[in-house]
């Protein structure tokens, strides 16, 4: 149980195009999803927190107009990288919080990641 | 900013116990300590978490000091497949009461045959 999928797993695009990445909780409902970015040999950096039905909360330094997040349902959140440039090339990872998890229980489950390469 | 510090790398012989230390001296009373690991180019895998008591599951044991300023993850019998980057993380409560994981740099564990 508690499986999170991401699609696509890998994408290569030309500079200036937009790329959409989907994050789905397959067998549970997630009121909160998180989007991370990871550059080579670095740790995960939280980009934004997404709550179903409301606007995402972005971390300091993350451009909300460039990284559009939509969390329209309890099982799906999308990240759109608009007008992508080579410096946006990275490993994007989502996670989802199990709705109704008991206090103190493990609640955050991660997807397998999406490798974005912008040429 | 990360609330944890870990050694950048460690080695362990296959079949031996791997003990991975973590310092979190600024942890608050209601903040949990989580451990995840990441194998190259994959999503993080949950290992274990705790608040103040020691915890054990099928993967590992978590030993938290009484003052909660440090902890140790123990893999009792390391195998080659345990080679990964291990992250010790403090879960904080952010804006909107969202519980967030603040990631540090992790420890790269190499299990050697």
Image: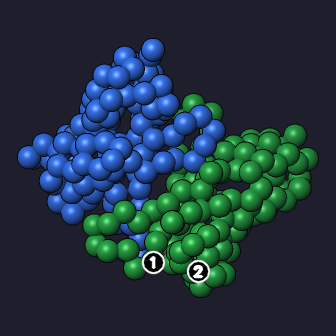
| Residue B75 versus residue A4 in the image, above or below | above
Q: Position of residue B101 (x, y in %)?
A: 41, 56
In the image, farthest residue toward the bottom:
A53
Q: Mark 1, chain letter?
A: A
Tell me what residue is drawn at x 45 percent, y 14 percent: B113
Q: Quadrant of residue B92?
A: bottom left
What x and y, as percent, mark residue A85? 81, 46
Q: Is residue A68 visible?
A: yes
Determine the chain carrying the residue at label 2: A
Which residue is at a point 28% across and 26% down the rendered structure image?
B17
Q: Nearer the viewer, residue B53 or A31?
A: B53
- Disc nearer the start of the sequence (2/1): 2
Q: Is residue B45 above or below residue B21?
A: below
Please tell me whether mark 2 sits on a helix, a strand or a loop: loop
Of B42 and B97, which appears nearest the observer?
Answer: B42
Marker count (numbered): 2
Q: Which residue lies under the disc numbered 2? A: A74
Looking at the image, the residue that sits furthest to the top is B113
Is disc 1 surrounded by few (<14), some (14 to 19) or many (20+) residues within 10 Å?
Answer: some
Chain letter for the blue colouring in the rendering:
B
Query: Which residue position is annotated with label 1?
Result: A99
Q: Position of residue A60 (x, y in %)?
A: 52, 57
Task: Residue lying at the far left in this picture: please name it.
Answer: B66
Classify residue A108 as left or right of residue A22.
Answer: left
The reply to whether the C-beta atoms of the residues labelled 2 and 1 are less than 8 Å apart is yes
CA–CA distance between discs 2 and 1? Answer: 9 Å
In the figure, the shade used to draw chain A is: green
């Amino acid at each position: 149980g508690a499986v999170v999928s991401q699609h696509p797993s890998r994408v290569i695009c030309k500079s200036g195009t937009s790329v959409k990445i989907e994050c789905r909780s397959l067998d549970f409902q997630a009121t909160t999803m998180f989007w991370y970015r990871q550059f080579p040999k670095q740790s995960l950096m939280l980009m934004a927190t997404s709550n179903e039905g409301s606007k995402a909360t972005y971390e300091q330094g993350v451009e909300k107009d460039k990284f559009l997040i939509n969390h329209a349902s309890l099982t799906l959140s999308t990240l759109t990288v608009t007008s992508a440039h080579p410096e946006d090339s990275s490993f994007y990872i989502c996670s989802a919080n199990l709705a109704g998890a008991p206090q103190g229980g493990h609640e955050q489950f991660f997807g397998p990641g999406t490798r974005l390469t912008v040429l | 900013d990360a609330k944890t510090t870990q050694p950048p790398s460690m080695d362990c012989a296959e079949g031996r116990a791997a003990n991975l230390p973590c310092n979190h001296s600024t942890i608050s009373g209601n903040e949990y300590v989580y451990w995840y690991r990441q194998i190259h180019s994959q999503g993080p895998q949950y290992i274990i978490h705790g608040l103040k008591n020691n915890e054990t599951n099928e993967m590992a044991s978590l030993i938290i000091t009484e003052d909660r300023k440090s902890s140790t993850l123990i893999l009792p019998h390391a195998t080659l497949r345990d080679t990964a980057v291990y992250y010790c993380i403090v879960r904080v409560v952010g804006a909107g009461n969202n519980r967030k994981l603040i990631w540090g740099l992790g420890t790269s564990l190499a299990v050697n045959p």
